[in-house]
Image (spheres, rainbow, N blue to C red):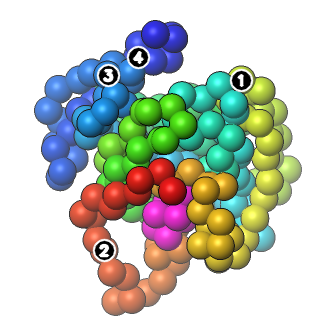
Amino acid sequence: MTGRESHLVELVDDAGRPLGQATVSAAHQPPGRLHRAFSVLLVAPDGRVLLQRRAAVKTRFPLRWANSCCGHPAPGESLADAANRRLGEELGVAPVALTEVGVYVYYAEDPSTGRVEFEYDHVLRADAPADVAVRPDPDEVAELRWVDPARLMTEIDADPRAYAPWLGGVVSRLLRAGEPAGARADDDAPERSGGR
């Protein structure tokens, strides 16, 4: 078990209430255990979001495009502290202000590694300054690109296997946060993806 796989995550129920803890490795073994996670979207002043292509050594969905960074808060750790820690580790980005724009509960099986994701995922928006310095760790990130989020949703529909299975749900939470409240259709039931 690698160092990151031995870290503890917070197990939760389907309403996000803490139930206990497990290692990252145990939580991601089939059939998976629902646990707290976060997905950060760095948003440029022009509205584009930063995507990372996950490094080949990742144990879940390697070499697929995903949101700017993601991870798991340790039991008792705040989302902001955990997310800023991972932004620094993965992208070399200094701490930023974060806004939660929704929760995305999903289940996905990775056919290439046999691992699963079963996550109560807090979607966090980070407004990046125009001159944001990004220095990705090659052990975490294969490549980066900025993309318009509405265009990204079309790309995911056209070629879902190029993207992490949670990315569409994460980006949809970001897009919904910009709509009038009456236009939102909040559905926090777990979405299932067989690792398309």
Determine which of the numbered discs, if any, sits on residue 26 in the image.
3
Q: Secondary structure at mark 2?
A: loop
Instruction: Residue at 41% x, 44% y: name it.
Output: 109
| Quadrant hosting residue 89 | top right
Instruction: Residue at 66% x, 55% y: name it.
Output: 162
Q: Could you tell which of marks 2 and 4 lies nearer the N-terminus?
A: 4
Closer to viewer: mark 3 or mark 2: 3
Mark 4 lies on residue: 7
Mark 2 lies on residue: 186
Q: Could you tell which of marks 1 and 4 lies nearer the N-terminus?
A: 4
Mark-to-mark CA distance, 3 and 4: 10 Å
Determine which of the numbered discs, if any, sits on residue 149 in the image.
none
Measured as percent of width and height from the top left, residue 177 is found at 47, 73
| Quadrant hosting residue 84 | top right
Mark-to-mark CA distance, 1 and 4: 17 Å
Mark-to-mark CA distance, 3 and 1: 22 Å
Mark-to-mark CA distance, 3 and 2: 30 Å
Specify the principal SS of the magenta part.
helix
Magenta stretch bounds: 167-173
